[in-house]
Amino acid sequence: MVTNESISIFSLASLAVEYVGSLLPENPLQEPFKNAWNYMLKNYTKFQIATWGSLVFHEVLYFLFCLPGFLFQFIPFMKKYKIPKDKPETWENQWKCFKVVLFNHFCIQLPLICGPYYFTEYFNILYDWERMPRWYMLLARCFGCAESCFYVIMCMGDYSFDRNY
């Protein structure tokens, strides 16, 4: 049940993010992104953008953010920060982990990535550039949503599911 208190907290947070956004300089990449987005809308269907575009974007960002951690584990200086110190890193274990990650991304997350397309179609949410929220509002929403999800997962119980890899 939504209370007036929770509504005021969300609206205050939104106002704070908008205020911070007003202090930021204009994004120099906005025009190239706008042109790329409009090109995408003209040449691809909404389903292709929402599903395959999101999947490609997700995979690129996921592996880009994982790259430093992957490289650090093979640097001798960084081995002192390794959590399971008694388990050496091998390419065989890395390959096994990579296959599990790909399975999870394509068999579990891909069907979930398809969901927003149907959501936007059902609620008639438009994809045009003018109605898209500003980048700092999207960043605040994504950060809040991601942190909330991780908090809920960690509170649900045993979150040490990656001990085998």
Image (cartoon, helix red, strand yellow):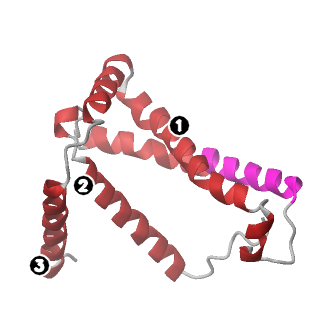
Left or right of 20 in this view: 118: right
Span highlighted in magenta in the image: 90-107
Which-is-in-front pick, marks 3 and 2? 2
Magenta-colored stretch includes residue 71: no
Disc 3 from disc 2: Cα separation: 22 Å
Q: Main secondary structure of the magenta part?
A: helix
Q: Residue at x 78, y 64 (%)?
A: 165
Which-is-in-front pick, marks 3 and 1? 1
Q: Which residue is mark 3?
A: 4
**Disc number at residue 137?**
2
Q: Which residue is mark 1?
A: 56
Q: Residue at x 19, y 75 (%)?
A: 2
Q: Quadrant of residue 78?
A: bottom right
Element type where label 3 sits in the image: helix
- Image quadrant holding the N terminus, namely bottom left
- Label 2: few (<14), some (14–19) or many (≥20) C-alpha neighbours in 10 Å: some
Query: Label 3 is placed on what type of residue?
Result: Asn
